[in-house]
Amino acid sequence: MSQTNKVVPLVPISRVVFACVVVATLDGAFAVVLYVYLLRLCSPAQLMQSIAGALLGRAAFRGGRTTVALGLVLHCAVACGWTVVYAALRDRSAWLRQLTARTRGALMAGALFGVLVWLAMDLLVVPLSRASATPLRSPVFAILLAWHAVGVGIPLALIVREPSRRGSPLAVHA
């Protein structure tokens, strides 16, 4: 029995790590701007404690710096988790690699992935934790849905895709 293996280059780990850092930073900064400065619901420390609250419940708000750090670690771990999921999907899907070879396709795939990330987090993951989901009818739900398309999925798809022949992993393909 003869089998032909097509060698598909995996996304380099350096690009995955870079995407993790960018996505975690952008998403964290957006959360601070939205919840701390625009909605004035909490301080940056309380925002991170609310993330830790997914594991610890209300006790996270009594944990001081330790639960702030835990919230930051959890936030980064989730961002990296979704980045790895996207990179793995891209590695295994010729269709996704072909789609994202062009900027327009990467923008579409990224936006869709960002929407799926937000829906999965808010409708599946968060309800299974000790945290509170954002109500579907809340304007904040729509804001976060749009944000995840633009600020999470699109940067992720642009960073993880194949670099251009000109050598830059962030170069734009026409």
Image (cartoon, grey):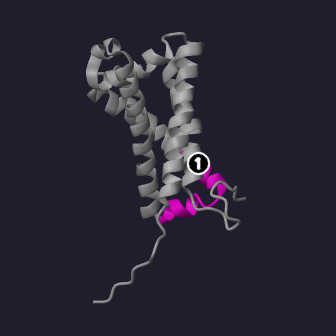
Front-most of residues 133 and 130 = 130
User: Which residue is found at the position 39% from the left and 39% from the top?
Assistant: 77
Q: Give above or below for 37 relative to 5.
A: above
Is residue 118 or residue 15 the one in the foreground?
Answer: 15
Q: For the N terminus, which image quadrant?
A: bottom left
Secondary structure of the magenta portion, mostly?
A: helix
Is residue 137 among what the camera can see?
no
Outermost residue, bottom direction?
A: 1
Determine whether, in the image, residue 127 is placed left or right of residue 28: left
Magenta residues (range) = 94-111
Q: Which residue is mark 1?
A: 108
Residue type, numbered disc 1: Met
Which x, y percent locates residue 142?
A: 52, 25
- Residue at figure coordinates x 40%, y 38% from the top left: 78
Total of numbered circles in the picture? Answer: 1
Whether residue 105 is situated above or below residue 44 in the rendered picture? below
Residue at figure coordinates x 29%, y 14% from the top left = 58
Which residue is located at x 45 percent, y 62 percent?
Answer: 91
Does the rendering let one see residue 13? yes
Q: Is residue 162 magenta?
A: no
